[in-house]
């Protein structure tokens, strides 16, 4: 079978490239291609991975005869014509959470640097001076920070600023009062109400017709004297020419900008001011963010090429960002649960029940249901199941579907449970990478992150069973990497979930069945 081909036109982390190559794809990294050269080269590729410089135009898409998915290793997709891609049936996805921590931390760095006049003090020291009084700063403590845009990054900034003891006010027409309250932000209905209140202002808004030039001369005039302004979002939200006038007049005490309307930006009205701290769009440029962006987009591209749901598909998901924020990370976990169920059942189920518990209970479960259904039907290779078509796919396969919201998730903050025709899998997420873990299977309580190859044993509990299993696998050169045991004392039954490495043949499975009095044995490939 011909290997699928992926073209990468901008530098991404090696970890991402390694993921794609381990999946068996042919990956070509061709940097700095001119538009004409890219158009001439793209025809045989199934996937394209870009960052912010490669322009994906209708003309390029016309030349891409085999293209199925475009991955943006980062957040914004301004350089991709999403409408043209949608018209040609090409999925566009991004890695929206890859750099949010880095961007939030850079925002705090600019706030602190401006408040404490660090660039000026540093320049003075390098010039051989020692001028302490000249660099008297101001504290963040008990000052008012206005946050415009309370999405992913704005929310992280709020959490961090709260740690500095700041009073938080904000404006975001899409932010619910409940979310604002959870972030400790006093929500205001209009921009104008906030401006006179804020000692510091930071913006975390998208680039739209409404946000470009949002803060012009009249808004700047309405701000508190000595205000400090920070923008790590999109260039053009502040009118830079007007801002420079207010900096010169002393109305604005300091400015921290990481983004500019035209980039690269080598000159601007702010360049002459020492209290304008300018950085070259580096908020997302950390080692950790680059690794996350490369790894996440590699996984999403793989999912798209294999016909699975792509959680961050820009043009294939009708769900709003707040829903994806809440339940999006659970999509791969529900897919995994579905795959386990599908392989245990070995057939299409008649009924599917999905339970969302804890902090995800109130979110729209449609995308989770789609993930579970996609996993269960993976063996049918029917193509991607989405939130939009999940009900129709289930109906077409004769599967009755139900969803349930449960306020409490037991010992977990959140969890999901997928059950089909009597086979149940409970999942949760763990750690900074939100790795999926199975926390229940067939009614047995376990806690394990499944690997690519798993063996599941169910038997009447008795001494020596684990030793016999280990001996047979060891003799067959199959390594047990991790293992969990769950029991049902009332039934005197045990379930063993093993992650294994090495080829598990039918002969090995037959040996295990012959050696141990098993109720069930399943080999599961994920």
Image: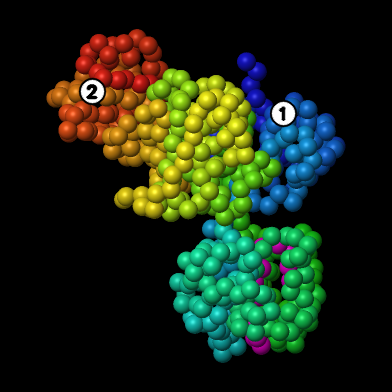
Q: On the rendered structure, is 93 left or right of 366?
A: right
Assess disc 2: are there few (<14), some (14-19) or many (≥20) residues with their C-alpha within 10 Å of its C-alpha. Answer: some
Q: Residue at x 72, y 35 (%)?
A: 90
- Residue 20 visible to an observer of this rendering: no
Q: What residue does disc 1 label?
A: 45
Between disc 1 and disc 2, the foreground one is 2
Q: Main secondary structure of the magenta part?
A: loop
Q: Position of residue 492 (x, y in %)?
A: 17, 28
Q: Secondary structure at mark 2?
A: strand
Q: Residue at x 43, y 54 (%)?
A: 359
Quarter where residue 237 is shown: bottom right
Measured Cα–Cα span from mark 1 to mark 2: 48 Å
Q: On the rendered structure, is 424 left or right of 279?
A: left
Q: What residue does disc 2 label?
A: 459
Q: Residue at x 83, y 39 (%)?
A: 58
Q: Give the position of the N terminus as an image quadrant.
A: top right
Q: Position of residue 280 (x, y in %)?
A: 69, 62
* In the image, residue 214 lies in the stretch drawn in magenta: no
Q: Which of 435/441 is in front?
A: 441
Q: Residue at x 61, y 83 (%)?
A: 197
- Please report whichever mark, 1 or 2, sits nearer to the chain's N-terminal start: 1
Q: Secondary structure at mark 1?
A: loop
Position of 141 relative to 489 (above/below): below
- Residue 423 visible to an observer of this rendering: yes
* In the image, residue 234 lies in the stretch drawn in magenta: yes
Quarter where residue 171 is shown: bottom right
Range covered by the magenta-colored residues: 224-238
């Amino acid at each position: 079978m011909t290997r699928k081909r992926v073209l990468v036109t901008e530098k991404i982390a090696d970890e991402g490239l390694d993921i794609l190559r381990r999946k068996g794809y042919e990956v070509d990294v061709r940097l700095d291609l001119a538009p004409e050269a890219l158009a001439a080269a793209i025809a045989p590729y199934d996937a394209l991975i870009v960052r912010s410089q490669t322009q994906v135009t209708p003309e390029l898409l016309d030349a891409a005869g085999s293209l199925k998915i475009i991955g943006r290793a980062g957040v914004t997709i301004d350089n991709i014509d999403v409408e043209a891609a949608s018209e040609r049936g090409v999925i566009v996805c991004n890695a929206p959470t890859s750099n949010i921590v880095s961007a939030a931390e850079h925002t705090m760095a600019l706030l602190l640097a401006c408040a404490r006049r660090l660039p000026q003090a540093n320049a003075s020291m390098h010039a051989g001076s020692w001028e302490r009084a000249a660099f008297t700063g101001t504290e963040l403590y008990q000052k008012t920070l206005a946050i415009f845009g309370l999405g992913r990054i704005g929310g992280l900034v709020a959490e961090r600023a709260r740690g500095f003891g700041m009073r938080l006010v904000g404006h975001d027409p899409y932010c619910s009062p409940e979310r604002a309250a959870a972030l400790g932000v006093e929500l205001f209905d209009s921009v104008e109400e906030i401006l006179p209140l804020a000692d510091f202002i930071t913006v975390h808004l998208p680039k739209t017709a409404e946000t470009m030039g949002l803060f012009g001369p009249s808004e700047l005039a309405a701000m508190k004297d000595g205000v400090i302004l920070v923008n790590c979002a999109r260039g053009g939200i502040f009118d830079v020419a007007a801002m420079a006038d207010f900096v010169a007049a002393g109305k604005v005490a300091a400015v921290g900008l990481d983004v500019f309307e035209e980039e690269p930006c080598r000159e601007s009205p702010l360049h002459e001011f020492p209290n304008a701290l300018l950085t070259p769009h580096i908020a997302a440029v950390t080692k950790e963010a680059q690794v996350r962006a490369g790894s996440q987009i590699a996984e999403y591209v793989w999912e798209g090429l294999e016909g699975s749901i792509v959680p961050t598909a820009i043009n294939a998901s009708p769900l709003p960002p707040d829903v994806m924020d809440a339940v999006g990370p659970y999509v791969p976990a529900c897919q995994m649960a579905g795959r386990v169920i599908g392989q245990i059942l070995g057939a299409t189920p008649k009924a599917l029940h999905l339970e969302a518990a804890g902090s995800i209970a109130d979110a729209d479960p449609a995308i989770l249901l789609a993930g579970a259904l996609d996993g269960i039907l993976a063996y049918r290779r029917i193509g991607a199941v989405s939130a939009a078509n999940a009900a129709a796919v289930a109906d077409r396969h004769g599967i009755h579907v139900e969803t349930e919201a449960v306020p409490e998730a037991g010992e977990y903050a959140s969890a999901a449970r997928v059950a089909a025709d009597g086979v149940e899998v409970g999942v949760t997420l763990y750690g900074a990478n939100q790795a999926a873990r199975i926390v229940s299977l067939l009614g047995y309580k376990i806690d394990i992150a499944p690997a690519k190859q798993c063996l599941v044993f169910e038997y009447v509990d008795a001494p020596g069973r684990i030793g016999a299993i280990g001996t047979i696998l060891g003799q067959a050169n199959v390594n047990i990497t991790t293992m969990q045991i769950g029991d049902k004392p009332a039934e005197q039954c045990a379930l063993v979930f093993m992650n294994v490495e090495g080829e598990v043949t039918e002969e090995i499975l037959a040996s295990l069945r012959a050696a141990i009095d098993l109720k069930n044995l399943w080999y599961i490939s994920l």
